[in-house]
Amino acid sequence: EAGVTQFPSHSVIEKGQTVTLRCDPISGHDNLYWYRRVMGKEIKFLLHFVKESKQDESGMPNNRFLAERTGGTYSTLKVQPAELEDSGVYFCASSQSGHAEQFFGPGTRLTVL
Amino acid sequence: SQQGEEDPQALSIQEGENATMNCSYKTSINNLQWYRQNSGRGLVHLILIRSNEREKHSGRLRVTLDTSKKSSSLLITASRAADTASYFCATVSWGNQFYFGTGTSLTVIP
């Protein structure tokens, strides 16, 4: 069974540019989560999808971040325009309904110059 | 506010020794989970302990939970070089929100 995949693995962009991160959850997992880890800090929750609906987006830092999950399969996280403080590793995770364990992807390392 | 907070931040031991990591948190939880992250990889789920449990074992892993002290510990017995990784605790609220700490970086010296 394929795990959670994320693309790209690394992205280096300049301040003001736009970047879109993609997450493919494990097939059949209704729950999809986005997290971010800024260098040296804790892994912070960004938002949670149940199928295509945003269940909880309380962790989204500001309106420069837009997450979508059209069709309830893969998800994208767009940062527009990117700022220096957006640099970090963005993790995606998925889980089955009613199951507490989350399966994480390898993360996308975003560097904003 | 930050929830899970691991201690120590870094730990270096010899192969064969035991490694103990601690996690403290601030509010009521449904369960607490421990994850491992190898360099450049995603987090891998290790073990889950529910709020009404006090101790759990899985292979060489032993987790304890003290809800009165709002703390948990992860013990890895007979450590191996392959255990070298960062370890994170995640506290899970009753609303199923995950809160991770900053992690403990474990180095096992062969």
Image (spheres, rainbow, N blue to C red):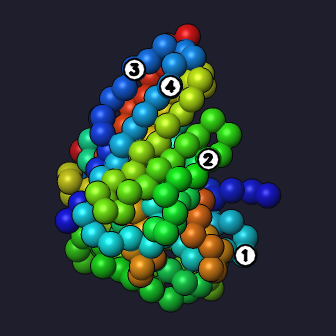
- How far apart, in angstroms, are the residues tagged by discs 4 and 2? 15 Å
The answer to whether dots 3 and 2 both sit on one chain is yes
Q: Give me the chain letter of mark 4.
A: B
Instruction: Name the mark nearer the viewer: 4 or 1.
Output: 4
Q: Is residue A104 visible?
A: no
- Residue that badge 4 annotates: B18
- How far apart, in angstroms, are the residues tagged by discs 4 and 3? 11 Å
Residue type marked 2: His
Mark 4, other Cα within 10 Å: few <14 / some 14–19 / many ≥20: some
A106 or B91: nearer the viewer:
B91
- Residue that badge 3 annotates: B12
Residue type marked 4: Asn
Please name the residue shown 39% across and 20% down the image.
Answer: B12
Residue B72 point in image, percent of width and height: 39, 51
Mark 1, other Cα within 10 Å: few <14 / some 14–19 / many ≥20: few
- How far apart, in angstroms, are the residues tagged by discs 4 and 1? 38 Å
Give whichever of discs 3 and 2 has the lower sequence position.
Answer: 3
- Residue that badge 1 annotates: A28
Which of the 4 image quarters holds residue B60? top right
The answer to whether dots 1 and 3 both sit on one chain is no
Q: Are marks 4 and 1 in contact (CB under 8 Å)?
A: no
Report the side of A64 relative to B17 (left or right): left
- Residue that badge 2 annotates: B57
Mark 3, other Cα within 10 Å: few <14 / some 14–19 / many ≥20: few
Q: Give me the chain letter of mark 3.
A: B
Q: Is residue A1 visible?
A: yes
Please name the residue shown 55% across and 43% down the image.
Answer: B62
Give whichever of discs 4 and 2 has the lower sequence position.
Answer: 4
- How far apart, in angstroms, are the residues tagged by discs 2 and 1? 29 Å
The answer to whether dots 2 and 1 both sit on one chain is no
The answer to whether dots 4 and 1 both sit on one chain is no
